[in-house]
Amino acid sequence: MNRPIVTVVGLGPGSIGLVTKETTDAIAGATTRFVRTTRHPSASLIPGAVSFDDEYERHDTFAAVYAAIAHRVAEAAHREGSVLYAVPGSPGVLEDGVRLLVADERLDVRILPAVSFLDLAWLRLGLDPVNAGVQLVDAHHFAQATTNSAGPFLVAQCHADWVLSDVKLAFDAARGDEPVVVLHHLGLPDERVVSATWAELDRLERAHGLVVDHLTSLYVPRLGEPIAGEMARLHALARTLREKCPWDREQTHASLVRYLIEETYEVVDALNALDIDDPSTDEALIEELGDLLYQIEFHTTIAEQQGRFSLADVARSTHDKLVRRHPHVFGSANAETAGDVVTTWDEIKRREREAKGESTDGSDTFFAGVSRAAPSLSLAQKLQKRAAEVGFDWPDVEGATRKLEEELAELHRAAVSGDPAATRMELGDVLFSVVNVARKLGLDAETALREAADKFVARFSRVQLLATMRGTDLTTCDLAQLDELWDEAKRQLDNN
């Protein structure tokens, strides 16, 4: 029994003049014609062809697109007996759909040779790919494909800015000045071969007026060192989960806030448990830092899907801000001590707020940039520090201590009065004053209170142990017995 025939032809890299006569003859002799996409300059050579552009809109991954196309071509071949399928470039280069058709033993697949974009790329780059040892890489798998190599690479499938953004992120050791060559619309009247840098990969339109599309590829002569690619793998995973996991799909920036806070506190716990003499404690910190990192990935993936910003924007913004705020490292400023660095940092932040139009003169926007969602002790310290920038501060710790004593007296009077609202307000003033004392002592109130809480847990746990050893029920102890156990716990722990 004769198998249905599928004739696969290539439309070359773009120019109609590069389509072979054998291909045009095959097109003319076919009655049922398909073209992978009409977004190709030579697609007009196939009149009456059915395109598969709709499949790109229907599916989330290229693998699913190619599988759907192969299925439709095979169905038509069984129905019609013979069909023609045209693809951009060469059928033998980066055509997963063609490979699926060839693997279908029910079909007789005949592939006609065609000119590939590679042929033009080698000519424009002026190199022999064999002698130069160039590796052809799919941009969607850049991190994995280049893990153990420094290049050179010719990167295909660079069809959108976000793809090049992922490529850029995959090289986590980049300085930013690594040279690359962008190959755009090869063989067409608007062909461009642009020399650029690694830092410009995700902003080619701004830097070179070049709009990335499906006829764009990238040549990377050499990377400084092999690419780890782990960040790119995590980014790809975040995107996959966002597309395929029902829970991930439902999340928003707002719904993830609680998890971001939880993961942050768990990192703090892991840091507090870190033992410099016990490398095994690193594992918990690695895990918790990873969980926090994924929260950042999650938020940037949501933003990327909304077309707002990407992880590259976040990384670039942070990098540029840190360079800007370290003029003693990257500029001509001097800083001999950590205190000098803090002073410089605060002054730069003040100028940045002014440049953004944020007030520094006491108006209601004076505290812009201070997160009100921060833990209350940390919030109080940040507010006081901001106010101190304009001189609203005690000259030394003595003034702050006297203010604390004053607030304690007011709390006592409010408590005696029996007014809950007044008592709560005065208690808040006491806590705010305690934070001020800590700040004037050069201490972080949040850290100090956490250390006190940890110390309390350790002492009370020892109290429980002592009570158990003595056969004492804590719930039946009077205050004198509890004080005795507490003092004994303190002596034991202080002597360790």
Image (cartoon, helix red, strand yellow):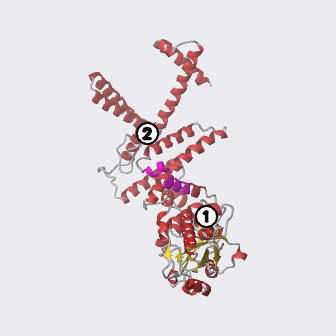
Q: Nearer the viewer, mark 2 or mark 1?
A: 1
248 magenta-colored: yes
Name the spot of residue 169 as percent of width and height, x first. Answer: 56, 61
The front one of 313 and 87 is: 87
Regarding mark 2 in the picture, which secondary structure is present there?
helix
Mark 1: which amino acid? Phe
For the point 39% across and 51% down, the residue is: 369
Residue receiving disc 1 = 142
Q: Nearer the viewer, residue 309 or 93?
A: 93
Magenta segment main secondary structure: helix
Q: Which mark is residue 439?
A: 2
Q: Amino acid at mark 2?
A: Arg
Name above or below for residue 20 compared with residue 469.
Answer: below
Q: Residues within 10 Å of mark 2 (few under 14, many from 20)?
A: some
* Label of residue 41 in the image: none
Magenta region: 235-252
Along the line of sight, the residue nearer the viewer: 376 or 211: 211
